[in-house]
Image: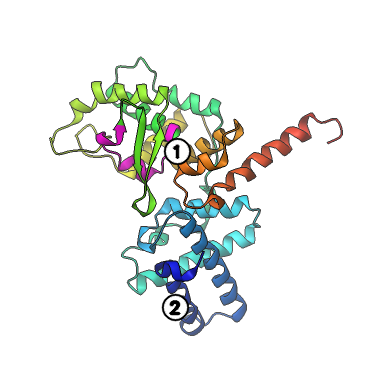
Amino acid sequence: MDENSNKAIYYPIRQFKGYIAIERGLSSNTSEAYLNDLQDFAEFLCASGINSYEDVEREDIEDYLFHCKERGFEASTMARRIVCLKVFFGYLFQDKIIPVNIMEVMDAPKIWRTLPDSLTPQEIERMLAIYPVNTQDQLSIRNRAILEIMYACGLRVSEAVNLTVASINRDDSVIRIRGKGSKERLVPIGHHAMQAVERYLTKVRPLHKKDNGTVALFLSYRGKPLDRERIWMIVQDTARLAGITKEIHPHTFRHSFATHLLENGADLRMIQEMLGHADISTTQIYTHVDSRKLLSIHKKFHPRA
């Protein structure tokens, strides 16, 4: 990635170099390590289609750390990168480059515990079974539609929150998603998810909608658009009810979507397109996940493993 092609990402790092050397008084070795970390972070952001630090969200930080984890980084390196990002985002906020410091509420142990994991297809089914297809409960119908579409389309939680009724092409069973950098992509919904969304649109949303100007797809019982925190709670409550003890959050569905596609033979470039990654190197983290599974299978079944 040419640094001149995205000055909004790379220029603050050059400015940060002077800040940590003069104002923070860090050693030359620590300063060099931080700058190398931030160069790697910047390349990840650009590959993900993120062109400004104002657009970086909590899930992007988690995605990046998962990306580092899957490249085999040691715990000490991961810990330094988290500290580096906390210092860097503190600097960006102090210098008014970003309006909110998202790292301020992300402590290192919590980030480490919540790095995205993948669910098995069986665990996905257990979570969906919490909201049976034949239920008449309004919130259960809505919650199933949320989980179905997030898994079927590999959505970021922010993308799920921003879905509108017009995002759904019911004739072609595809969804139009506005992702990072305001880039749009079309992703197939799939039969089961489409059925769940149709049921929600016909049986529940009209009852929840209080304002004719509301275009958001997913609404609360009081007719307000759901926010990311509410979807987070839905996912975690569902995992608990399903007896799943892994650290689960909305982004887990996105990682499971990509992992399951790859495991079943999907082309990596097609997965890249559906995830909305600007660069295939970001998508390639899932090849590491798949390689671990292959190694596990080999060790288990090969007589001379």
Q: How many marks?
A: 2
Q: Can you tell which quarter of the image residue 181 is in?
A: bottom left
- Whether 164 is among the magenta residues is yes
Q: Where is residue 265, by image quadrant?
A: top right
Residue 120 shows in the view: yes
Up the image or down, 85 lies above or below 116; here it is: below
Residue 253 pos. (x, y %): 47, 37
Residue name at image x 47 percent, y 43 percent: 273
Q: Report how far apart the C-alphas of labels 2 and 1 lie in the structure.
A: 36 Å
**Residue 219, can we see it?**
no
The amino acid type, in three-letter code, at marker 2 is: Gln
> Dot 1, crowdedness within 10 Å: few (<14), some or many (≥20)?
many
Q: Residue at x 44, y 57 (%)?
A: 106
In the rendered image, the vertical position of residue 38 relative to residue 49, given as above or below: below
Q: Residue at x 54, y 50 (%)?
A: 280
Q: Secondary structure at mark 2?
A: helix
Magenta includes 159? yes
**x%, y% of residue 83?**
52, 65
Q: What secondary structure is found at the residue carrying circle 1?
A: loop
Choose the circle earlier in sequence order: 2 or 1: 2
Viewer-proximal residue among 66 and 90:
66
For the C terminus, which image quadrant?
top right
Task: Give percent across and percent down for residue 21.
Answer: 51, 82
Q: Quadrant of residue 235?
A: top left
Amino acid identity at mark 1: Gly
Left or right of 195: which side holds 126?
right
Which residue, given by chain and number where applicable, does mark 1 sit on? 154
Question: In the picture shown, does residue 301 fall above or below 1?
Answer: above
Residue range corresponding to the magenta coloring = 152-168
Report the side of 276 relative to 120 (left or right).
Answer: left
Q: Which mark is residue 15?
A: 2
